[in-house]
């Protein structure tokens, strides 16, 4: 039995993820694993038909495909994303049709589920027989229980391959929107001195996107600044080298235009719009490269306090996973999501109204400095990063550690001494049955007492 492993780490063989695949290789000698470093070699795969053809031939001749990759910004890295785009662009999808597929990720388990949903959807779009996903934490291989779990996953996958078990399809095919957008009815919105920047990847590729972007740009008075990523000198994707962890200095510094662009344009704007077209189940790999390269900021909210909106062409409203990724990303930046406008709406007038609303609310919210309260994404994400940076990731991410200390982000609950004392007393007292009865009786009233005090306050 042959398994084609599509390695999605830009580090190639020297990758944490690949060690998990080698574990499976060792445990199941009856299966032959053939490795393809598609993320590392993306530049040659893009240019060299022969090299790309060899990967596709490897997939064709395999009995199954294993998508094995590290998490990069809630999904796959830009290089892997580009490989997936190439499959469709170069007409290689038939090689994948009907093949059993599984997904294996390594990460610190921040939005591993959205990355796996993405690969599941790509497999469904390729008409593969998707078996399932396995999420390994970076250090799981060191734990006996986790090794046993991974072995079971491997066993079940091999069984499914042998028996040709049909997959349960999780994603319907996407339907491209048919609306031809006609910009109309601009009501000028005074920018009130706010810096407004629209970043698009490439407007030449999509006329609806261009018209929506230009409509939004012209809605502001003065018009918003527009920059296209295709005009920025970006030499390549994030290499995952972690060089930036110490001082927030990227290995590309001084070698391309990305960092200057990010620091001088993106970080200094008040209102930011991300504009792009759907490519498979996300934006383009160029947009993904933009997000990955921002890793030089570490796990800190580099875009804190900004308003961020999205202008998207394509079947946006059919991809809940993509919306979740973007919503969580904005929250993690401590920015405010002003909205998503896509041409996946009923008609042009709905799109015009949505763009108008997004423009005016972005300025109104920016003037007030309004940032929506964090939801589960940010609350849970902050705790996960807090613990990871304080713990075993501190050596690698020393710049994050300094930032977290300076900004009070090490808010461990064991530091709440007052509550630890109150809890100690109340837990002991409520072991006594009549105290517990009285406690339960008074609980509702006691719960709103502090609010009553807050209501009396004027600010
Ligand atoms: C640019 C970048 C982005 C990352 N994004 C995430 C993420 O969104 N969620 C997560 O849990 N881990 C994230 N990680 C951590 C990696 O997924 C993790 O270290 C992985 O095990 C690396 O695997 P590799 O050595 O095979 O490349 C990120 C790492 C890098 C370099």
Image: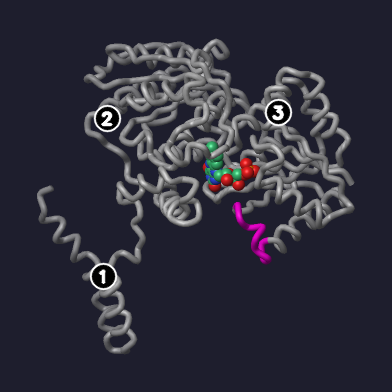
Which residue is painted at 68% across and 66% down in the image?
Answer: 144
Mark 2 lies on residue: 366
Answer whether residue 144 is magenta in the image.
yes
Mark 3 lies on residue: 41
Q: Nearer the viewer, mark 1 or mark 2?
A: 2
Answer whether residue 207 is magenta in the image.
no
Mark 1 lies on residue: 444
| Cα–Cα gap, marks 3 and 1 | 62 Å
Q: Which mark is residue 294?
A: none
In the displayed structure, would residue 153 be above or below residue 63? below
Colouring = one colour
Q: Left or right of 16: which side holds 368?
A: left
Q: Nearer the viewer, mark 3 or mark 2?
A: 3
Which sits earlier in the primary sequence, circle 1 or circle 2?
Answer: 2
Q: Crowdedness of circle 2 by 10 Å Cα count: few (<14), some, many (20+)?
A: many
Which residue is painted at 41% across and 14% down in the image?
Answer: 226
In the displayed structure, would residue 175 be above or below residue 297? above
Residue 377 versus residue 44: which sits nearer the camera? 44
Indicate the quadrant of ligand 1 in the picture.
Answer: top right
| Cα–Cα gap, marks 3 and 2 | 43 Å
| Cα–Cα gap, marks 1 and 2 | 38 Å
Q: Residue furthest bottom?
A: 433
Q: Left or right of 37: which side holds 10?
A: left
Which segment is the magenta one?
Answer: 138-146
In the displayed structure, would residue 300 be above or below residue 448? above
């Amino acid at each position: 039995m042959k398994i084609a492993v599509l390695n999605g780490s830009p580090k190639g063989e020297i990758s944490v993820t690949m060690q998990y695949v080698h574990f499976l290789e060792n445990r199941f000698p009856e299966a032959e694993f053939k490795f393809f470093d598609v993320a590392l070699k993306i530049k040659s795969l893009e240019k060299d038909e022969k090299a790309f053809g060899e990967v596709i031939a490897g997939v064709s001749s395999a009995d199954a495909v294993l998508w094995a990759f590290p998490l990069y910004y809630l999904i796959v890295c830009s290089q892997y994303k580009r490989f997936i785009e190439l499959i469709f662009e170069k007409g290689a999808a038939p090689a994948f049709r009907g093949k059993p597929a599984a997904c294996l990720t390594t990460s610190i388990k921040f939005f591993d589920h959205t990355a796996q949903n993405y690969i599941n959807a790509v497999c469904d779009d390729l008409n593969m027989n998707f078996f399932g996903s396995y999420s390994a934490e970076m250090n799981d291989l060191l734990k006996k229980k986790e090794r046993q779990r991974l072995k079971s996953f491997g066993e079940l996958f091999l069984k499914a391959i042998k028996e040709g078990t049909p997959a349960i399809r999780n994603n319907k095919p996407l339907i491209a929107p048919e609306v031809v957008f006609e910009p109309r009815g601009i009501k000028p919105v005074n920018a009130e001195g706010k810096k407004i920047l629209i970043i698009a990847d490439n407007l030449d590729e999509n006329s609806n996107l261009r018209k929506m972007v230009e409509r939004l740009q012209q809605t502001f008075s003065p018009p918003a600044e527009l920059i296209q990523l295709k005009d920025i000198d970006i030499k390549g994707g994030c290499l995952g080298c972690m060089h930036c962890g110490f001082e927030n200095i990227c290995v590309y510094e001084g070698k391309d235009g990305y960092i200057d662009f990010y620091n001088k344009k993106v970080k200094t704007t008040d209102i930011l719009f991300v504009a792009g077209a759907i490519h498979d189940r996300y934006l383009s790999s160029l947009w993904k490269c933009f997000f990955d390269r921002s890793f030089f900021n570490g796990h800190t909210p580099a875009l804190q306090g900004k308003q961020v909106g999205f202008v998207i062409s394509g079947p946006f409203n059919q991809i809940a996973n993509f919306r979740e990724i973007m919503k969580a990303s904005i929250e993690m930046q401590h920015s405010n999501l002003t909205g998503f406008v896509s041409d996946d709406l009923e008609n042009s007038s709905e799109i015009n109204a949505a763009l108008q609303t997004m423009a005016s609310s972005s300025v109104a919210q920016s003037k007030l400095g309004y940032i929506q309260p964090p939801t589960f994404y940010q609350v849970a994400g902050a705790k996960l990063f807090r613990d990871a940076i304080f713990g075993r990731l501190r050596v690698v991410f020393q710049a994050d550690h300094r930032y977290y200390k300076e900004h009070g982000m090490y808010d461990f609950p064991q530091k709440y001494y007052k509550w630890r004392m109150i809890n100690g007393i109340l837990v002991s007292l409520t072991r006594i049955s009549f105290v517990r009865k009285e406690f339960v009786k008074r609980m509702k009233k006691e719960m709103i007492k502090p609010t009553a005090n807050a209501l009396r306050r004027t600010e």
